């Protein structure tokens, strides 16, 4: 805020009318209040970002766990199917050999 007083003094020193210098300082103060972030704003955003990243990490862990479970289930089903195909194939081979012998 000290620089606003310095700005006011600088404007008055170059013969800008006092009311207009005050208007410039007020406009600048309003603009800075809406466009610049304070330390509290930055800290709030830092904490919010940290929480968002933690939620994202948990969500990704849950998704990978679910994907791992799905892959394990599919692997078991594939193993059972391939084993069944092998048993049927060997059975048909043995049956075919007995018919020809």
Image: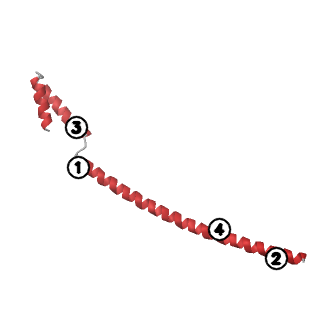
Q: Mark 2 highlights which residue?
A: 94
| Numbered disc in front, either 3 or 2 | 2
Vertical comparison of 39 with 1: above or below: below
| Closer mark to the observer between disc 1 and disc 4 | 4
18, above or below 75, in the image? above
Distance (Cα) linking label 3 and label 2: 88 Å
The mark found on residue 11 in the picture is: none
Say whether residue 44 is left or right of residue 8: right
Please give the label number shown on residue 32. 3
**Number of dots carrying numbers:** 4
| Number of the front mark, 1 or 2 | 2
Horizontal arrangement in the rendering, residue 85 relative to residue 72 (left or right): right
16 or 82: nearer the viewer: 82
Disc 1 on helix, strand or loop?
A: helix
Q: CA distance from mark 2 to mark 4?
A: 24 Å
> As drawn, is 10 to the left or to the right of 93?
left
Q: Which residue is mark 4?
A: 78
Secondary structure found at label 4: helix
Secondary structure category for the residue under label 2: helix
Residue drawn at x 85%, y 75% as measured from the top left: 97
Q: Disc 1 versus disc 4: distance between alpha carbons?
A: 56 Å
> x, y (%) of residue 49?
34, 53
């Amino acid at each position: 805020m000290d620089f606003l007083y310095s700005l006011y003094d600088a404007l008055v020193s170059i013969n800008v009318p006092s009311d207009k210098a005050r208007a410039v300082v007020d406009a600048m103060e309003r603009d800075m209040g809406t466009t610049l972030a304070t330390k509290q704003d930055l800290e709030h955003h830092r904490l919010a970002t940290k929480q968002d990243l933690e939620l994202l990490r948990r969500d990704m862990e849950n998704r990978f766990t679910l994907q791992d479970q799905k892959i394990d289930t599919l692997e078991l089903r594939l193993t059972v199917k391939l084993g069944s195909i092998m048993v049927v194939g060997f059975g048909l081979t043995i049956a075919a050999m007995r018919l020809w012998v």
